[in-house]
C-alpha cells in the first residue's frame, strides 16, 4: 500500500501521461505541460540546457517540440 505522498506522486504521474497523450493526439498544446511545473521550477534538457521558471518552461516546450507531432 503506497503512502499518501507516494499515492499523490503516482496520481500526478498518471495525469501527466494522460496530458502527454492529449498532446500527441493534438488536443492540447505542448505549452500546457508547463502546468505540471512549479513557478520556480528548473528544467534541464540535455540538448537545450537549463530552463528556469514555469513560463520559460512553457515557452521552451512549445518551441522545442514544434513539428514533432
Image (cartoon, rainbow, N blue to C red):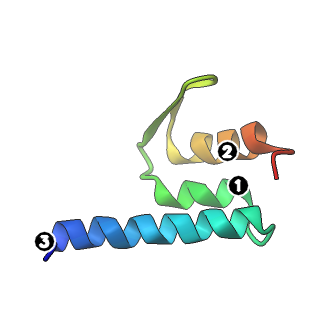
Q: Which mark is residue 61?
A: 2
Q: Residue furthest front?
A: 1
The residue shown at (42%, 52%) is 38
Q: Which mark is residue 30?
A: 1
Q: Residue furthest right?
A: 67
Q: Is residue 11 above or below residue 44?
A: below
**Marks 1/2: CA distance?**
6 Å
Q: Position of residue 3 (x, y in %)?
A: 12, 71
Residue at image mark 3: 3
Tag nearer the camera, 3 or 2: 3
Q: Is residue 45 above or below residue 27?
A: above
- State how many labels appear: 3
Secondary structure beneath label 3: loop
Question: To which quarter of the image does residue 2 belong?
Answer: bottom left
Q: Is residue 11 above or below residue 34?
A: below
The residue shown at (54%, 61%) is 35
Q: Position of residue 45 (x, y in %)?
A: 55, 30
Secondary structure beneath label 1: helix
Q: Position of residue 57 (x, y in %)?
A: 58, 42
Q: Earlier in the sequence, mark 3 or mark 1?
A: 3
User: Given contact means CB atoms under 8 Å apart, are the residues at marks 3 and 2 in contact?
Assistant: no
Q: Dot 3, how many residues are within 10 Å of its Cα: few (below 14), some (14-19), or many (20+)?
A: few
Q: For the N terminus, which image quadrant?
A: bottom left
Q: Earlier in the sequence, mark 1 or mark 2?
A: 1
Between residue 62 and residue 9, name the one nearer to us: 9
Secondary structure beneath label 2: helix
Question: To which quarter of the image does residue 4 belong?
Answer: bottom left
Q: Dot 2, how many residues are within 10 Å of its Cα: few (below 14), some (14-19), or many (20+)?
A: some
Tag nearer the camera, 3 or 1: 3
**Marks 3/2: CA distance?**
32 Å
**Marks 3/1: CA distance?**
31 Å
Amino acid at each position: 500500500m503506497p503512502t499518501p505522498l507516494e499515492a499523490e506522486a503516482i496520481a500526478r504521474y498518471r495525469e501527466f501521461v494522460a496530458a502527454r497523450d492529449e498532446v500527441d493526439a493534438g488536443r492540447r498544446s505542448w505549452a500546457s505541460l508547463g502546468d505540471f511545473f512549479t513557478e520556480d521550477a528548473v528544467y534541464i534538457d540535455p540538448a537545450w540546457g537549463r530552463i528556469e521558471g514555469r513560463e520559460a518552461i512553457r515557452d521552451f516546450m512549445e518551441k522545442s517540440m514544434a513539428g514533432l507531432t
